[in-house]
Amino acid sequence: MFNADAFINETIESLKQEIQGNAIIACSGGVDSTVAAVLVSRAIGDRLLTIYVNNGFMRKGEDEEVQKMLTDLNVNFQIIDASEEFYKALQGVLDPEKKRKIIGEKFIRIFERSAKEFNAEYLVQGTIAPDWIESGDGVRDTIKSHHNVGGLPQDMKLKIVEPMYDLYKDEVREVARALNIKVSERQPFPGPALAIRVIGEANRENAAIVRDACAIVEEELEKASLEGKMVRPWQYFAVLLPCQSVGVQGDNRAYGKTIAIRAVESIDGMSAAYSRIPYEVLDKISMRITREMKQNINRVVYDITNKPPATIEWE
């Protein structure tokens, strides 16, 4: 049986031996990277620089929320707005694997610049077991390349440190609870962020659309959960599809965009079942997306596919 306290103590001692110098860590504010940041910070203190990068595809209010969290955790941190770099790098890119690898390499180049300024030799990542399992190797097929595995450039100079490499999501949450980290129950959020919830070109316009839609999905499902109408799903979000369909605006025929809603139940992310969301909740989400959003969304669909055969994210 997994023992979170024993894991914490053993990992901190191991990190003290492994990291002989300064290190940086990429922290998105999610449970994986935050746990990794706290573990390494306890091991090496101010020799760790925690970096949060806004890649232009973060959720509403994410920058402010992460800044407050890192301040509360009392870690040494830096916030970088690199949104223009990512938009430029992803211009015209449609293939999801290429998109993930471009994002992964772009992150590394930004971290390399920060590492040089901080005189750091090590890059800490919140990689967990599903990341490298799904990214494949010589034995396993690639399901999807996680940006922190399949997106790593071969010429990278930084030494990689992955303190949670063999843990699954449920175990990471146990560690987060033992460390008293507030984001322990936060739903998973992909490293490439909303870029992989835009099916097609991940540009500024499309990012804004899926950002608004995701915010509505999160607000309504969390509200319904608090009101006792349903159990909060393990993960829940919106996806912008690369197709348009005919709708009606007033008395006129209109051609509008389509949003898919995805919500699943899981333990470790390796398999998942779609959530049985009450119709009244789905109805409220659909009405808000089609009425409140200004980007001409005229169709909302709900994904009822399990994993397998689907993955949780659409890309």
Image (cartoon, helix red, strand yellow):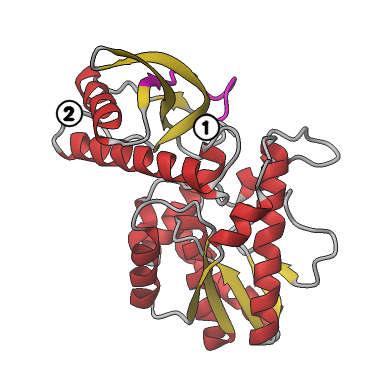
Query: What separation in Å lies between label 2 and label 1 (alpha carbons)?
Result: 23 Å
Q: Can residue 181 be seen in the rendering of this structure?
A: no
Q: Which residues are magenta?
A: 299-312
Q: Nearer the viewer, residue 212 or 24?
A: 212
- Whole-percent x and y of residue 304? 43, 18
The residue beneath circle 1 is 312
Q: Can residue 174 be seen in the rendering of this structure?
A: yes
- Whole-percent x and y of residue 93? 68, 40
Callout 2: few (<14), some (14-19), or many (20+) C-alpha neighbours within 10 Å? Answer: some
> What amino acid is labelled 2 in the image?
Lys
Identity of the residue drawn at 57% across and 60% down? 84
The residue beneath circle 2 is 229
Residue 301 among those drawn in magenta: yes
- Give above or below for 245 relative to 78: above
Majority secondary structure of the magenta segment?
loop
Identity of the residue drawn at 28% across and 25% down? 286
Residue 112 among those drawn in magenta: no
Q: Nearer the viewer, residue 92 or 134?
A: 92
